Image: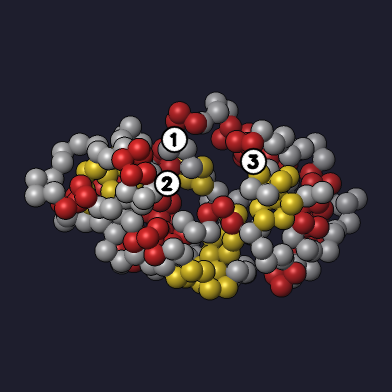
Amino acid sequence: MGGQWLVRIEDIDPPREVPGSSDDILRTLVAYGLEWDGEVLYQSQRLDAYQTKLDSLLANELAYYCQCTRKQIQTMGGTYDGRCGALEMPLASGAIRVRNTIGIDKFQDTLMGDILVDKAFANEDFIIKRRDGFYAYQLAVVMDDAYQQITEVVRGCDLLETSSRQESLFALFGLTPPTWLHLPLVCTNPGMKLSKQNHAPAIDIAKPQTSLNAALQFLGQAQVEPRHQMPQMLEQAVSQFNINLIPKQKEVVLN
């Protein structure tokens, strides 16, 4: 599309982060010829901006503290019922939930078409700062998409439904959401995606040509000449890419 391709390191969950992984990610991108535009944005350097937004939401009663546990929410049927937000005397500590007055339950995906989300999920007052003090992904990613002026988001279908919550935050903040395109997940078995949490091996930076062609094949695209260097392979892949050939399902199980 002739735009810029930006890299963001989403490092706002220290307990789950593996030391050195951010540098590994950048080295892998370079090995695959995926050179980014501008400076890398680290979410860990944006904490003041997230807190300023939270303070504003709390001051305007668009967010509130909640001390309900997961066990308590299960007794509500699995969806939080907003009880802490209805208290006459608001709580002064706990997780922070957005007062989800918009609750968008339908949005458009470039590949998947119209996406309808369960209304209970879409209307839930969801957490934007965790009880342990870490900022929630939904808040950070919306603020950073706006900060970086992101217009196109391409990612996996494991985030398809939660995009409705990001749509709701964009609307609440008076911002225009990006265009979404959610790709099918590579799975070894139904519901078992290839990811680090499922102990999938890392891609091979020593043989990027092979991995690139495997990815193109998975996406229904024509393969490229593997004898070329990565920049030439990527240029060819872009020139012959056909979005209409991408599988239109949430998961593709490898044999």
Badge 1: residue crowd in 10 Å (few <14, some 14–19, many ≥20)? few
**Amino acid on which the number 3 mark rests in the picture:** Ser
Residue occupied by mark 2: 137
Residue 181 in percent (x, y) is at 58, 64
Which of the two discs, 3 and 2, sits closer to the camera?
3
Residue visible at 63% across and 59% down in the picture: 250
Q: How many marks?
A: 3
SS assignment at label 2: helix
Quadrant location of the N terminus in the rendered image? bottom right
Badge 1 vs badge 2, beta-carbon distance below 8 Å:
yes
Residue 196 in percent (x, y) is at 63, 36
Residue occupied by mark 1: 13
**As displayed, is residue 136 above or below residue 17?**
below
Answer left or right for 71 relative to 55: right
Residue occupied by mark 3: 195
Answer left or right for 61 relative to 176: left
Residue visible at 66% across and 33% down in the picture: 199
Do we see residue 239 in this rendering?
no
Which of the two discs, 3 and 1, sits closer to the camera?
3
**Amino acid on which the number 1 mark rests in the picture:** Asp
Label 3 to label 1: alpha-carbon separation: 17 Å
Label 1 to label 2: alpha-carbon separation: 9 Å
**Quadrant of the image occupied by residue 111:** bottom right
Residue visible at 9% across and 45% down in the picture: 89
Label 3 to label 2: alpha-carbon separation: 18 Å
**Amino acid on which the number 2 mark rests in the picture:** Tyr
Upstream in the sequence, badge 3 or badge 2? 2
Residue 92 in percent (x, y) is at 15, 38
Upstream in the sequence, badge 3 or badge 1? 1
